[in-house]
Structures are given as C-alpha cells and as structure tokens.
Amino acid sequence: MNATRNGVLLGALALLVACDSRTPRDDYDDFRDRTATARGAEACIGGEATGVFEDIEGRWLLNALLKGGIRVGLRIVFDLPEGSDGTPPLALNARIWLHDQPDDAEPLVTTTTTVAEDGTFELVADPLDLGTDVIESEAAVIAIVNMHSRIVDGEQWCGDATGSVTSPLNLALDGSTFYARRDDAASLVFDELPFECPGDPCAADMGVAPDAAVDMGVDGPERPPSPDLSSVESQRRDLTGEYFVTASLAGAVPARLWLSLLYRESVGEDGAVQAAIDGALRTVTDAPDAPAAANFFAPVDAEGRFEVWLPGFSLQIGGLLVEGDILLAAATLDEGFCGEVAGSTTSPFELSLAGSTFSAVPWTPGGEAPVEPVNACPGAPEPAE
C-alpha cells in the first residue's frame, strides 16, 4: 500500500475521534426550530407557552427522563421568603434532594426561583450530584440542569430541561423532560409518575438520533445499509464500563481506541424494557482524566445489538481536513462487544469503509493493552486486503 493510501486510511481512523464544535445551546435551538410547527401555544414551554399562577409552596415529587435515557427522581420543597405577599412575580426558596434521600438529609441544592404571572418559572440545579446508582457505576453523575417549568394547576407542574452532565461523561441534556406532583403527605411513588407534561407535543425524541443527524431543513448524508451481524450471537446486558477497542479499517489500517459506556434501562408505558447507551470516545494514549474526543447516544435492542450513526464528522490533521460519515454496528458478547463499520470518507478522497471490523474488551484506562487483541467478531473471516 502506498503512502498516499495509508494517509487516506489514517484519515478515516481520525473520523472516529472527531470533535463536535456545536454547543448544547445550538442543539437546543435547533430542536425548538425543528418542532415549532408541531407545538401548540398552550402546550409548549421555554418562553413559548404559559401555565397558570398557583400556590406551589410545599413538597413535590419529580420524575425526569434526561437525554440518553437517564431516569432521575427528585424531591423538591418550595417555601416563601420572609416578608413575601404571595403575589406574582413570586420569589420562592427551593431545596432539592434525590427522591429516596432521608427527609433529614442535607439538600443537594438550595436555590431560588421566581414564578411569573403566567405560571412559568426557571429552576436551576447547579451542580446536581445524582450519585452512583443513576448509572450503576463507580463514579457519581454530576449535572447542571435548568428546568423550564410551567404550572398546570395547584397539584402539578412540568416542562423540559436544558443543561449537561459534566462527569463522568460530557452529555448534553437539552430535550430532557420532567413532571412534578404535589406530595405533601409523602405518599407518592416515583416510578408511577409520568416524565413529561400530559399530552405535551413538545416532548423530545430523547436522543433516538443525535441532533447533528436530524433533518434541519437540508438533506443530510445518506445512511449506509446496516452491516449484517445476524450470525453473531448477541444478548443484551449491562455494558457500563471502559473498553479497549481494536479495529481494522478498510481491511488494512489498525486502530486502537478507548471507549467509555454508560448503560441504562427504563420501562415504557407499554411495560416493555427499553435500553440505551451513552458513549465517550478517546484514544488509548489519552490520560485517564482526559476529556472525550467525541460523545454519542444509541438505543440497544432486545438482543443487545446497537448502531451508532456519525454523519458529517471531520477532523483537521495538520494541513489536511478529513471528512466523512460512518456507521458502527455492534453485537454484545459475554465479555465486551464487536461489530462492523460502514460509511465512507468524503474528503480529501472518497474511500469506502465497508468491511471494516472492530472488537472491544474490558480495559483499565492507562493499563496495558490486551495481550492478543482481536479486531473482529469471533468466527468472522479476515478482512480482505
């Protein structure tokens, strides 16, 4: 293989660790633009709709579904500052706990909010420590959550949220939804509450596809056909952890990556279990505390298979800008996962990634590489040169 082709293939590898320069605010603004025609003035929030002004002093139980499938329950207590006359704009003190913390525990967040005459208010939890149970990992989830809220009546309020998870992964929360009901008697059950405004047409798609891959009024790149992994035995299980990924791109160029995954399950209204992963991609030479080069979200089906579609990724390599669109298809193994890559580079040369393969095994970041790493699913034929 000549030097030029090697350079092109290495550019394709670089697409796997490309950075997205968009901000969470950009993504949220695009979401609002995309769904503008589907929203009714009486239903939507974030400054585009109204609620009703009601007394919300007291104790509330809140159920939130954060972007990426993270379910969070909160207990919130509002009280009036001394000297308040109870009329709008109404300032309120707010204390926030996880829903299952003891009543005598110190609140995670103590803040204030102001309820407008139209029943809307902004409630900011910064930072919100969600603990380790949220993602069943050793590292607690730390988030900044801005709840754009509207009062439905004196017994319920709801809305959508912006913000981000800042640790252990970087994950934009824009498009998350929540619902809160009065719980002065401490008798409600978190799992029995909805997680969005009743009948809200503004409810987000919860990350079924990254915002970068959603139609924003222009035609996007065509998604390639999914690689056929039907011959690979796969079973859904918890994939939370760190992985050493070995790949063979275009059948010739080896790649070594570090992948961090957070796995979550939730039960839909029909009783079906839904699963998803949030992922962070780094190189294996990065320091253990290095920020992620790229983040993604992917649903996981009942057999443990998932696909990650990354259109329009680009990376500057010296004086060369490499661009392309890639699809990763994976099957879950007893230990780790494996799969195939589809898609292509589009600049500076067109190169198909069809037939590229990869395999991932559990790994301790900063530790030694696997002794005999493989770069394909068990029993898969060797990629053609």
Image (cartoon, grey):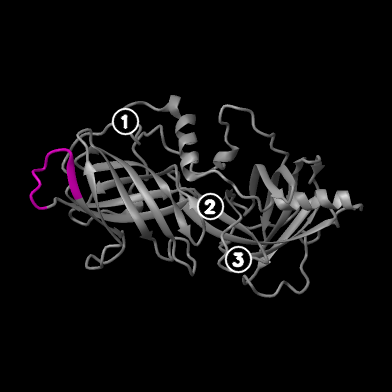
Q: Is mark 2 on a helix, strand or loop?
A: strand
Q: In the visual, does 375 lie left or right of 60?
A: right
Q: Where is residue 77 in the image (x, y as percent from the top left)?
A: 21, 54
* Residue 40 colored in magenta in the image: no
Which label was assigned to residue 275? 2
Sooner in the amino-acid sequence: mark 2 or mark 3: 3
Crowding near pointer 1: few (<14 within 10 Å), some, many (20+)? some
Residue 90 figure quarter: top left
At 49% from the left edge and 30% from the top edge, which residue is drawn? Answer: 34
Q: In the visual, does 243 lie left or right of 378?
A: left
Q: Which of marks 1 and 2 is in front?
A: 1
Q: What residue type is labelled 2?
A: Ala
**Quick one: 16 or 103, which is closer to the camera?**
16
Q: Nearer the viewer, mark 2 or mark 3?
A: 3
Contact between marks 1 and 2 (CB within 8 A): the answer is no
Crowding near pointer 2: few (<14 within 10 Å), some, many (20+)? many
Q: Where is residue 22 in the image (x, y as percent from the top left)?
A: 54, 43
Q: What stretch is highlighted in magenta?
A: 82-92
Most extreme residue toward the top, as rendered?
37
Which label was assigned to residue 263? none
Crowding near pointer 3: few (<14 within 10 Å), some, many (20+)? many
**Quick one: 204 or 367, which is closer to the camera?**
367
Q: Where is residue 226 in the image (x, y as percent from the top left)?
A: 71, 43
Q: Position of residue 84 (x, y in %)?
A: 10, 47
At 32% from the left edge and 50% from the top edge, which residue is drawn? Answer: 124
The residue that mark 1 highlights is 49
Across the whole image, how many numbered discs are drawn on residues? Answer: 3
Q: What residue type is labelled 1?
A: Ala
Residue 179 figure quarter: top left
Which label was assigned to residue 242? 3
Asked if residue 318 is positioned above or below residue 32 in the image, the reply reads below
At 82% from the left edge and 51% from the top edge, which residue is drawn? Answer: 7
